[in-house]
Structures are given as structure tokens and as C-alpha cells.
Image: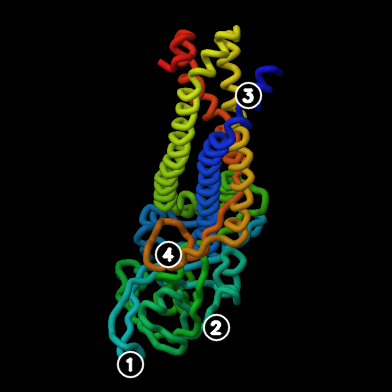
Amino acid sequence: MFLIKLAFKNLTRHKRRTIITSTALAIGLIMYILIDSLLVGMFTESNRNLKDAETADGKVLTAKAFEDIKFLPLNDRIENPDKIIEIAKSLGAKATKRVLINGDLIFTEEYFSKSGSVPILFTGVDLDKDNTVYNVFKERELISGRFMEPGADEVVIGSWLAEDIGAEIGDWITLSVRTAPQGDDPGFFQTIDVQIVGILRVDNPMVNRRVVYLSLDVVDYYLDMYGSVTEVAIRIPFGETLNSFQDRINLLLPKGSEFFTWKEVAADYIKLLEAETGGSSVIIFLVVLIALVGVTNTMLMTINERQKELGMMRALGMSERDIRVAFIYEASGIGLIGSLIGVLLGILINIPIIYIGIDFSLWMRDIDMGYKISSIMRGAWHKEAIYIAFVMGIIIPVVVAIFPTRKAILKSIPDCLYNR
């Protein structure tokens, strides 16, 4: 108890030094908590937005189509998608069919200020079932117009695509895509004149930037699909794991088709996101390192300036062990104060970041950062990181104090008293 009281007395006696050291430590911990929260939040929300607009929980594809998924060819199609949808329903899942193919959007001076073309993702959707799997065709996502009608030559496009070409509701555009091959016929390039009836903005930047949606029956007619589709997207039953559902459904699927999880479908995206997260982790390390340097510098100054105090303590009969423990207690006190302040302020500042977020829409509009987030970035509670921050805040000052204290104790009493 004497050593604890001595450490506490030293903390209150050197108030300015205690405040400076604790503040430096607290700032580092606050930054650690906030950056980690943003990284976890962006990773979680990005994955959710990917599944809500692009991959669902997974897709049924042919093996060949999965191999060529980057190119989205129409060569290998699912010929009987309704059967697969029934199989998914029998397992408690929800399913919808889609046709995806890369194409071009052509606009002319008749409706626009200039003529040109842009690459697009030509997407045919089942208007009756798409909302059971994806979260795109919701009224809240429309910023103007309406959704297309079945059988009509109408499209809904993303808001960024509309801004890029200067499109408005009622404008006519031309879509250029290749039709499905039939036997020895490789298909041909088809041009489709369609009217823009809706513009939507979702949380997924890919949709906003390059997707054009049409009714599936219109796509079936113009691309000679004859009821076939490129994929059947599935939402698995609540509470079931992807691997368990994958094993179950693959036993029932027709030969030549297979269920691939969203992680398999978006493997390139996941690798990119992991690389982004790894790079951001370096930033966290640098922030903590800066705080560590500040704490180290202050602790070294503290012990060097208290050489006479060390000599007097030893002259009065205190053992080297007691002196070392007293300084460790003092360093622990600084760490505890810094940790409490840092963690509490970090949690308080993190609340609006989680529930309100930070608007990065100006950056996301023109820069592809890899995350599937178009505007608001929100943090997330990460209890493990908060716990690590608190413990690390106490350990760092203790570790920093051990070595200079040991070095000072090795000096003789006269050298300490005369600060030599």
C-alpha cells in the first residue's frame, strides 16, 4: 500500500506531466477506436450492399458461366430456371432469375447535348420476384420517375450514369448487346431503343454508375433467350449457414448447374477489400506508434529529471525492487487515466459515426475505392478493439517505464544525487 500511495502522490504532484502523458495516450486510443470502427463498419456495410444489389447470398450458375463470370457470356445458360426456383423454395429459400450481360448505351443529340456511348451492365430482372432477393426495386430508391412495366421497352438506370450522360425521364436511348447463341449460330449484335422511365440511387456504387435494368420478358424477346437466364440468385433461409445450404441444394440441382456462394462469386472484390483493409491497418499502427513515441518521450524525461529523487529513495533504504515497482505503479496510473479518457471519449465520438455516419459522396462519385458504398460511411461497434485499446493503454506506459527505470537504478547513489 505504501508503494501505491507513493505512486499516487507522484501522479498528483506532477500534475502537468501526468495530464500531458495521459492526453497523448488518450488521443492515440481515440484514433485507434474510431479508425477501427470505420473499417469494420465499411467492411460490413460494403458486404451487405454487395449482396443487396449484386450477388444475394449466392447464385446458381453453370460451371462454365462461373469460370467466365467476369465476361458474362450468354453461351452457358440455365435452361429451366423455374425448376431451380422451386427447388430453392422447397429448402426454405427465396430465389429470382436474372439475365446479366455487358453491353453499350448509345445516346444521340436528338435527346442529349451530344452523342456518345458508355459501357453498361445490361440487366434483365423478374419484376415479380426480384424484391424478394434484392433490395433495388424499392420506392425509396427512386429519385425520379417510376419502375418499368412488364413487356414495355422501358429502362431504369443508375443516378450517376444519368448524370454522366445528362439523361432525364422520358429520354430515349439505344442499347447494344449480343444475342444468345443458338446451336451453330453465335448470335448477333442487337440494338434496342428504350425509354428511360426511372432513375434510382442505391447504396451500391456499381449500380449507380453502370447498370441499366429492363423487364426480364423484354430481355427474353430481344436476346433470343427462350426462357433461359444467366443466373438464379438466392437468399438462404434465416439462421442457416452458407456452406450447409450449399451442400443441401447442390444435391438437388439439375446436372450442369451449381450453387456458388456470394464469396465465390465476388472473389476478386473480397481480395481487393482485404488488401484495402490491410493497408488501412497500417494507418492504425502508425497512429498508435505516434502515441507510443509521445508517451515514451514523456516517460524518459520524467525518469531522467527525477534522478535525485531516485538517489534519495535509495539512500533512505528503499530496495531496487521497491523503486522499480513504485515507478511501474505510477506508469500504470498514467496508463489507466489515459485509457479511461481515451476509451470513454472514443465511445462517445463513435456514437454519431455509427448512427449518422460521414458523408463521402463527393469522393465516392468519381473515385472507386473498392468498397460497395456510395455515400455515407458508418462505423460499427467492435468490442474486441475497445478492450484491446483499454488494455494496451495501460501496458504501453508500463513497458516504456521499465527500461529507463532499470538503467537509472544501476547508477550509484552519489551519481543519482548529483545527476551525473
Amino acid found under the numbered disc labelled 2? Arg
Q: Amino acid at mark 4?
A: Met
- Category of crowding for the residue at label 1, using alpha-carbon neighbours closer than 10 angstroms: few (below 14), some (14–19), many (at least 20): few
Crowding around mark 2 (Cα neighbors within 10 Å: few <14, some 14 to 19, many 20+) is: some
Q: Alpha-carbon distance for marks 4 and 2?
A: 25 Å
Query: Which image quadrant: the N terminus?
Result: top right
Q: How dense is the environment of label 3, judged by Cα within 10 Å: few (below 14), some, or many (20 and up)?
A: many
Few, some or many residues within 10 Å of mark 4 (<14, 14–19, 20+)? some
In depth, the one of 368 and 142 nearer the eye is 368
Q: Earlier in the sequence, mark 3 or mark 1?
A: 3
Res 393 → quadrant:
top right
Tag nearer the camera, 4 or 2: 4
Earlier sequence position, callout 1 versus callout 4: 1
Q: Which residue is mark 2?
A: 146
* Residue 404 against residue 379 in the figure, above or below: above
**Of the numbered discs in the image, which one, if any, rests on residue 110?**
1
For label 4, the SS is helix
Closer to us: 374 or 301: 301
Q: CA distance from mark 2 to mark 1?
A: 23 Å
Query: Real-space Cα distance between discs 3 and 2?
Result: 70 Å
Please tell me whether mark 3 or mark 1 is closer to you in this view: 3
Q: Amino acid at mark 1?
A: Glu
Task: Indicate the position of residue 233 as horizontal and vertical percent values.
Answer: 53, 61
Q: Give x and y (percent) for residue 363.
A: 41, 64
The amino acid type, in three-letter code, at marker 3 is: Ala
Q: Which mark is residue 7?
A: 3
What residue do we see at 46% from left, 80% from top?
Answer: 155
The residue that mark 4 highlights is 364
Quarter occupied by the C terminus: top left
Q: Nearer the viewer, mark 1 or mark 4?
A: 4
Q: Nearer the viewer, mark 3 or mark 2?
A: 3
Give the Cα distance between marks 4 and 3. 51 Å
